[in-house]
Amino acid sequence: MKGGPGFSRLLAPLVPLYLAGYWARRLWLRLFAPRPRSLPGALVVSVGNLSAGGTGKTPACLAVAAHFSGRGRRVFFLTRGFGRRGGRAPLLLSRGRGPLFPARRGGDEPWLLAAKAPGCGVVVDADRLRGGRRALAEGARVLVLDDGFQQRLRVKRDLDLLLLDSRAPGAGGLLPVGRLREPLSQGLDADALVFTRAAGRREALRALRSLPPGFRSKPWFWARSRAESLRPWPGPGRALAPSRLKGRKVAALSGLADPAQFEAQLAGLGARVLLSLRFPDHHWFRPSELEQACRRARLAGAEWLVSTEKDAARWEAGFRPALPAYLLSIRLQVEPAAAFSALLERAWKSGPGA
């Protein structure tokens, strides 16, 4: 939570109110809401977290989908389309051959899932149960619930993956002081843990040991984002190796929950980040903002403007930058890879693949 310790102290009295509201809602759902409904005929894998803000859910969803689609199973993503500008009506964004609609209509993250996962479909619907039924009608055999942890009283799942930021697995406490949407204890509902932004096993193990003892009996993995390529904007154009960033003077443009992570990744690839242009998460960029970003980048001495694929989904299609612009494409690698694949296969064999 931004604002410093003093600001957090001002918000601290609100935490009991948030917690009371949370448990009142949970009690109401337990007593009066229908039990979680199943989606027969498909494996349901939830990828979610406890916190507000990014922990790498979209890349993790892509990693799960790659496992199953690589084995010839028809995969659909179920996502609510946070921040979409195309209304709230359910939307079949993709049947597996790329996005059928612009990002504004479906949302930046669903659009990115449709663009980066060939062969995988995408249904955008705040009601994941209804969205799942639509996907089943399209022949889905695996359903990946994007940001699905808070949907566990609505949709029955076969495998619940909980992502935790290895740098701060407790996320600093409950909202509004910290970033937790639910008490940390609710993470015990998960089947397996994935520690993101971990340099390796040792860092993930340190994060695990900082959690309550009940978490330590669960299967756990670690992952970090790895740069794949630099894609020029506007396309088409030849993608460059991330190593081309070494020694390059760049301006970093982003509208992310954690822009510092993106900028650190550029620096880790050897780029000289002269200017950080930060906008709110899921920000839809106006042409004037993009043009101003280019002007500021040139004044700062940047050779390139570098952003993310998720951000570019929210750029105007006709934007022509005043200096070379590139999008960093990343992939999430979950380790140990063999054990993670085995976990997914066990879920398949105990579900629709049985």
Image: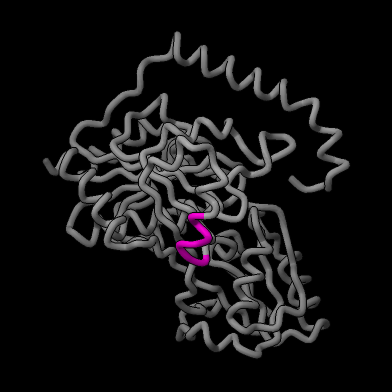
Name the residue at 39% across, 40% down.
217
Question: Quick check: 288 left or right of 38?
Answer: right
Q: Nearer the viewer, residue 144 or 6?
A: 6
Locate residue 33: give its quadrant. top left
Locate residue 331: give its quadrant. bottom left
Q: Quadrant of the N terminus?
A: top right
Q: How is the image coloured?
A: one colour
* Image position, residue 352 (x, y; %): 16, 40
Overall secondary structure of the magenta section: helix
- From this view, report whether residue 26 is shown above or below residue 84: above
Name the residue at 46% across, 58% down.
112
- Pick out the residue farthest to the left: 354
- From this view, report whether residue 167 is shown above or below residue 5: below
Q: How many marks?
A: 0
Question: Quick check: 281 left or right of 87?
Answer: right
* Image position, residue 87 (x, y; %): 54, 38
Q: Quadrant of the C terminus?
A: top left
Residues rendered magenta in the picture: 199-205
Q: Nearer the viewer, residue 300 or 333?
A: 333
Name the residue at 48% across, 40% down.
80
For the question of whether residue 104 can be seen, the reply is: no
Q: Is residue 277 magenta?
A: no
- From this view, report whether residue 313 is shown above or below residue 318: above
